[in-house]
Amino acid sequence: MRQDTGAAFLLEPVAFSPDGRLFGAIRKHTNGLATEEVFKQLMCFYFDGTSRHLTQFDVLAKDTGYAAVIETAPEKMASFHAIKRFIKAMSWERALRFRRLSRRTRS
């Protein structure tokens, strides 16, 4: 089990809640992960800083300790391919919104 607790502050509802109106259209199918869940996992990944490679999501998806720390069910953990599809679906305008939103959470 991992001993990560540095990203726990992101799990507070006030700290980070992406607006569905701004980012909801990224999700193309209802059987995939919710947009909020992908954002949460991406932000925890960025703040964790253990790896810069998106392939690390495949390792994290198998780590039940990490899933427990970020309060996500193990079956809801995103894979590398899910993250890659999510990022490709973002237009440059949404990328700027995401950047502004991430800056607000850091300050």
Image: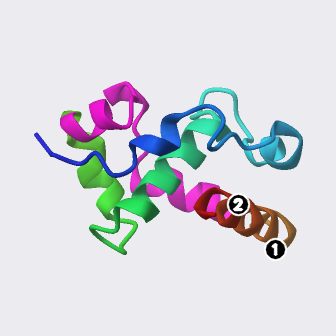
| Nearer the observer, 94 or 69 | 69
Q: Give the residue at mark 1.
A: 92
Q: Residue at x 83, y 44 (%)?
A: 25
Q: Amino acid at mark 1?
A: Trp
Q: How is the image coloured?
A: rainbow
Is 3 on the left or on the right of 49, as rendered?
A: left
Q: Earlier in the sequence, mark 2 or mark 1?
A: 1
Q: For residue 86: magenta?
A: yes
Q: Give the residue at mark 2.
A: 104
Quick check: 45 above or below 22? Answer: below
Q: Residue at x 45, y 64 (%)?
A: 46
Asked if the residues shown at circle 2 and circle 1 are in contact, with their CB atoms under 8 angstroms apart, the answer is: no
Q: How many marks?
A: 2
* Residue range of the region highlighted in magenta in the rendering: 65-89
Quick check: 78 above or below 52? Answer: above
Q: For residue 3: magenta?
A: no
Q: Main secondary structure of the magenta part?
A: helix
Q: Name the element at disc 2.
A: helix
Q: Amino acid at mark 2?
A: Arg
